[in-house]
Image: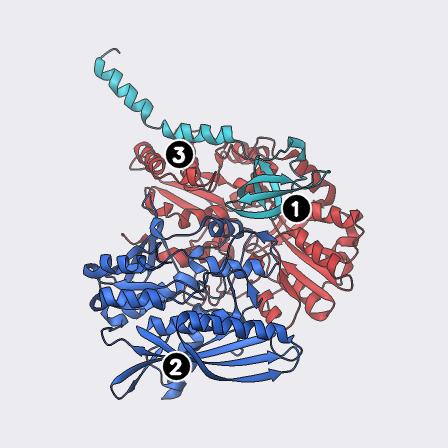
Chain colours: A cyan, B blue, C red
Amino acid sequence: MCLAIPGKIVELLDDRNQYAMIDVSGVRRKVNISLIQHEGVKVNDWVLIHVGFAMNKISEKQALEQLQLLQEIGEDKEAMAEIKGYQFD
Amino acid sequence: MLTDKIAFREPTIQLSHGAGGKASRRLIEGLLAPYFNMKDLNDAAYVQADQAKIAFTADSFVVNPLRFPGGSIGELAINGTVNDIAMSGAKPLAIVSTLIIEAGTETEILEAEIKAMQEAAEKANVAIVGGDTKVVEHQKADKLFITTAGIGLVDPRVNLSAGRVQKGDKIILSGPIGDHGITILFARGELDLEADIKSDTRAVWPFVAKLIDAAAPGLKWMRDPTRGGMATALNELARDAKVAIVLEEEAIQVRPEVRGACEILGLDPMHIANEGQFIAVVSKEYADDALKAIRQVPGGEQAAIIGEVHESDRHIVLSRSSYGGTRAIDMLVGDPLPRIC
Amino acid sequence: MRFIDEFRNPELIKKTLEEIERIIEPDDHFRIMEACGGHTYSIFHFGLQELLPKNIEFIHGPGCPVCVLPPGRVDEGLEIASKNSDVIFTAFGDVMRVPGKKGSPLNHKAMGTDVRMIYSPLDALDIAIKNPDKKVILFAIGFETTAPSTAITVLRAKELNVDNFFVYSNHVKIVPVLKSILDQPNMRIDGFIGPGHASVIIGAHPYEIIAKDYNKPVVISGFEPLDILQSILMLIKQLKNGEAKVEIQYKRVVMEEGNVSALEIIDQVFEDRPAFEWRGLGAIQNSALKLRPEFAKWDAEVQFNVQKITIEENKDAQCGDVLKGMLKPNQCKLFGKVCTPDNPVGALMVSSEGACATYYNHLYSTMNY
């Protein structure tokens, strides 16, 4: 369920920090950020948006780590196969 | 017996019957075609007048709001009919238009549309030669409804027929999709979304004219993917030509903002209406020339070959992604609706 | 698009598929339930079911908040609007074509009832503020993903003293329904692809009960092809090692503890219904949310005299069995013949993430192209 998509905060709209303007590939909408205020929100943060609300911040670090993990699939095996080839074990 | 052919049994007419998708087809094929004795259901009809083959079409425009980024109902009304004629391989010649106006509508609104119609007609090189005007009571029409009917002279070099489409033929698309439908959705103001998107409404005859010059012998079928989007147009092709169509997802252009809007709303660009694009099925031998010809006309730079015709007893449309996953592209029942799930 | 395109990288997809193929052995047969309708949609939309080895069988779960609505609920909401000309019925697009006794919300709209589609619950509140002489009902649907948004909207209505805005709550909870499915006799599910977005709110802890009490692994997954493939990889590894843990694949947005703020807000505004009738699954305890008594002023069920409407379901419709994962959509007697997206008998054929609509629209993609 639940279509939620990544968007970038381009403007914080009010003092009480309840609304921000987000940008998704050039499309802009006002979203309510009260659910993530406790995480601290700034312009250029990426957030996950669902029905006009930001649900959570998106961790770029975690995203990169995940991609890195997937990149490494098979590389361990290749490295092992190479070592075995040298008959060190 | 006529009654045998009346397949449409629904007790009332609903909005979905006008959306251009499956429900519309049911109404047209199941009720109108049997009574009107129509066999071929294309955008325009061919009428033989001695030596001349005339393309003849009509279309109605009920868009709301009347004005939107990139155009207005008046412009759509002219371009829409010009394009239907063009899709029949005919040079648009003349248009008549009927206006149904809701009583109480400000004159300046009507005037703006009349002006838009004339400007579009001049740009498309057609004459508005007549029509009719009616006014109905307040709330019996949504400010303005326009119907246009048009005629064109079919180019004798052209022979368009779904029956000619065969395995190996290439599918050419004139440009990016989704602009018009998303513009209208935004213009209604209910979704509170802003973006630099405008309707792609334009006359496509200039592209078609060059396409005919370059590739007439190989040109087999054309359609403009309006209401119901690419999905409807291509599924109609698959059905009528009794083939399967395989598209390369990466080749279909969608502007970033249109893509963003579709992602936010959970819509598929393939179901969204276009008012300035067309699809042409061209034989393998002529495909490159056809593409080149369209690309040379200003506004045609983003034309691309987006897929191919396959032989199959399942008359479907498939789209293949860059990593080899395929998905079926089906016609919607009614208008595409934003979703949150 | 950032955070979307990277997870559609063709090279990485191929790599992950190869790794899955490498680990799978010929005799393996894994029955994996993707709980969430969004995952059902993604799997077919990205053509993954064709690319994965046949040893993996997907059991489509009930995580489609529109599909699980008991027949009659939409009618109850529409009754209020069609009987009172000063009532505006608002709902997300997903609800608009759900077939009711006298037609869908869209049908009602075409016949003159004031039915409006909204994108956000806040839009409904806005309509109420702009139309003080009307009463606006928000037909609220969604799992825990959407409940906080409805809750904030109610709090805002209270803050602004809006007294013509009402919520008709159909919010449901994912873990109770998964438990209920696991409790069905003859239900073999080896592991779960856990809902990505509901988990952004509730975190990983609520799924512990599935891992501990039922000994089934759960991997909370994102919705892009790489997310789903990586989750499948993680599940298969657990199954091969005889493990049953809750893991988060969708780490870029899901945290162990969920969104604490959102959970507090849900708790502030909503309470569990003792029981809620689910389509095909019967009554499940503590599986749905209703407004707390202190918010009765904005509760449509309190403020309007809503007569419960029970609909006689088509006896041959097997929506419940499909929702439970006991049947594949194409095994339902009505599938494709009587029940089609054109003429849906149940909500699973209406919702674009319903298993039946997904199957119908993609049935052909199992061809070899």
- 10 Å neighbourhood of mark 1: few (<14), some, or many (≥20)? many
- The answer for which chain carries disc 2 is B
Q: Are marks 3 and 1 in contact (CB under 8 Å)?
A: no
Label 1 close to label 2 by CB (< 8 Å) = no
Compute the Cα span from label 2 to label 3. 53 Å
Disc 3: which residue:
C233
Secondary structure under tag 3 reads helix
Q: Secondary structure at mark 2?
A: helix
Q: Is residue B257 or residue C278 the one in the foreground?
A: B257
Q: Badge 2 local density, few (<14 within 10 Å), some, or many (20+)?
A: some
Three-letter code for the amino acid on which mark 1 is drawn: Ser
Per the rendering, the mark at residue C231 is: none
Name the residue: 21% across, 61% down.
B286
Chain letter for mark 1, please.
Answer: C
Q: Nearer the viewer, mark 2 or mark 3?
A: 2
Residue at image mark 1? C149
Q: Amino acid at mark 3?
A: Leu
Question: Could you tell me residue B196's position as x and y percent?
Answer: 52, 52
Q: How far apart are the alpha carbons under marks 1 and 2? A: 49 Å
Image mark 3: chain: C
Residue denoted by label 2:
B33
Considering the numbered disc 1 on the image, is that residue within a helix, a strand or a loop?
helix
Residue C90, horizontal then vertical, whole percent: 65, 60
Q: Is residue B326 left or right of residue C65?
A: left
